[in-house]
Image (cartoon, rainbow, N blue to C red):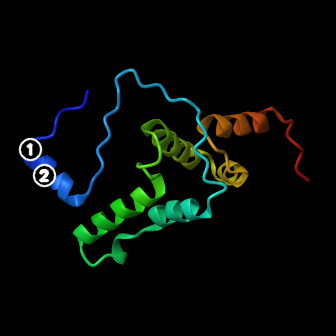
Amino acid sequence: MATALEPEDQDLWEEEGILMVKLEDDFTCRPESVSQRDDPVLETSHQNFRRFRYQEAASPREALIRLRELCHQWLRPERRTKEQILELLVLEQFLTVLPGELQSWVRGQRPESGEEAVTLVEGLQKQPRRPRR
């Protein structure tokens, strides 16, 4: 259960331009398409967010501000529903936890949802293994 922010915390969050999203208790994730495959700008924003390094910033505050900017550019909360944003995050984490070669192959297929990624993995698991020579 989420707790309310204290007034002084809300002021800080507003100064930093943070978007707060309240999740409903009865939330269920629908496999809606949150594709980035046809939008190279979004894919670039995603990669910029993931590849950002602390050393690229002059200070800890600048690093945090830059990460917020990059995350906002990638997730585009002004255009996506919270369910779509969560689906993107879950899809990314699912791909991240896959074993190396499997991860590379599934990422190469550019799934649009977690469900599509699971279907790809399950399809591979059903294929008979070829003997190595």
Q: Residue at x 84, y 36 (%)?
A: 127
Q: Taking 132 as reference, is 66 above or below it?
A: below
Marks 1/2 in contact by CB < 8 Å: the verdict is yes
- The residue lying at 50 percent from left, 63 percent from top is 45
Quarter of the rendering occupied by the N terminus: top left
Tell me the residue at 80%/32% (across/down).
Answer: 126
**Residue at horizontal 65 percent and vertical 50 percent from the top:** 103
Write down the quadrant of residue 94 in the picture: top right
Per the image, the residue denoted by label 2 is 11
Residue type at mark 1?
Pro
Closest to the observer, 103 or 115: 115
Q: Circle 1 sits on which residue?
A: 7
Gap between marks 1 and 2 measured at Cα: 6 Å
Q: Mark 2, residues whose alpha carbon is within 10 Å: few (<14), some, or many (≥20)?
A: few
Q: Is residue 41 left or right of residue 14?
A: right
| Residue 34 x, y percent position in the rendering | 57, 44
Instruction: Note whether 11 is above or below 120 in the view shown.
Output: below
Seen in the picture, residue 68 relative to 20 is either above or below; the reply is below
54 with respect to 45 (left or right)? left
- Secondary element at tag 2: helix
Residue at the limit of the structure toward the front, as seen here: 79
What is the x, y in percent for residue 116?
A: 67, 37
Residue 33 spot, x, y in % from top left: 61, 40
The kind of residue on which mark 2 rests is Asp
Against 116, residue 26 (above or below) is above
The dot on residue 79 is: none
How crowded pointer 1 is (Cα within 10 Å; few <14, some 14-19, many 20+) is rated as few
Q: In the depicted view, which residue is nearer to us: 4 or 131?
A: 4
Q: Secondary structure at mark 1?
A: helix
Instruction: Name the image quarter holding residue 130.
Output: top right
Residue 82 horizontal/vertical position (percent): 42, 39
